[in-house]
């Protein structure tokens, strides 16, 4: 099924289940449409609750498909994207915000763009044809913007990627 069909078939979890808790985000996911790790069939994403925060990690990544990142694998790792969900922001617990800025070292060409919000995203929990998923918007929190290597403008999208639930 194409990304366009996934996007058009998406139903936010808040529509079908108004009572959402932060723990409902936790689990093991497969990254469906991101260009990251497309050649790594055993690449997984994780959302775990640790010390009251939803932490994002990954395994089976990188050129050799054997790299890991995030606090699931190293409790002191500086790479620690946090998924923030809060009813106080008016978004409801089925919508969260995260940034992958902690994944980018200061000497990386992406660093300048990350500092300007390139790796900020809004995530929405929901379903596609009965499958539990997390829908991601595009770079710059769905607004789009300049990206390396040459500052080319990437179009903003409200629906750009999905993680689908694998295990819990």
Image (tube, rainbow, N blue to C red):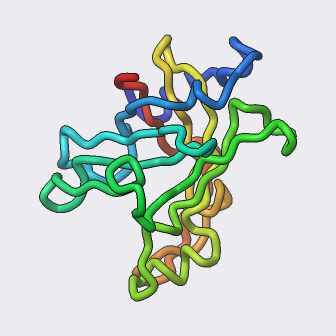
The image shows residue 24, relative to residue 113, as above or below, that is: above
Q: Residue at x 50, y 76 (%)?
A: 152
- In the foreground, 56 or 166: 56
The image shows residue 153, relative to residue 84, as above or below, that is: below
Identify the image quadrant of residue 163: top left
Please give left or right for residue 64 compared with residue 4 in the image.
left
Please give left or right for residue 52 compared with residue 1 in the image.
right
The residue lying furthest to the bottom in this view is 107
Please give left or right for residue 117 compared with residue 42 in the image.
right
- In the foreground, 50 or 147: 50
Q: Residue at x 20, y 38 (%)?
A: 42
Q: Residue at x 58, y 59 (%)?
A: 99
Residue 121: x and y, percent?
A: 61, 53
Q: How many marks?
A: 0
The image shows residue 5, relative to residue 35, as above or below, that is: above
The residue lying furthest to the left in this view is 64
Quarter of the image with the C terminus is top left
Residue 70: x and y, percent?
A: 40, 55
Quarter of the image with the N terminus is top left
Residue 57: x and y, percent?
A: 40, 49
Please give left or right for residue 57 compared with residue 51 in the image.
left
- In the foreground, 166 or 74: 74
Residue 124: x and y, percent?
A: 63, 35
The image shows residue 144, relative to residue 162, as above or below, that is: below
Q: Residue at x 19, y 39 (%)?
A: 41
């Amino acid at each position: 099924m194409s990304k366009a069909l996934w996007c058009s078939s998406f139903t936010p979890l808040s529509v079908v289940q108004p009572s959402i808790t932060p723990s409902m985000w936790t689990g093991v996911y497969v990254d469906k449409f991101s260009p990251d790790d497309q050649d790594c069939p055993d690449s997984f994403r994780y959302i775990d609750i640790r010390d009251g925060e939803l932490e994002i990690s990954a395994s089976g990544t990188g050129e050799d498909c054997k790299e890991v990142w995030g606090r699931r694998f190293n409790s002191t790792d500086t790479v620690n994207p946090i998924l923030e969900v809060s009813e106080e922001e008016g978004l409801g617990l089925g919508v969260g915000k995260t940034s992958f800025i902690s994944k980018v070292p200061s000497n990386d060409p992406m660093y300048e763009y990350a500092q300007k919000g390139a790796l900020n995203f809004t995530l929405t929990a929901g379903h596609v044809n009965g499958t539990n998923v997390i829908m991601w918007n595009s770079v710059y929190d769905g607004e789009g913007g300049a990206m390396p290597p040459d500052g080319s403008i990437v179009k903003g999208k409200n629906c750009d990627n999905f993680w689908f639930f694998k295990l819990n």
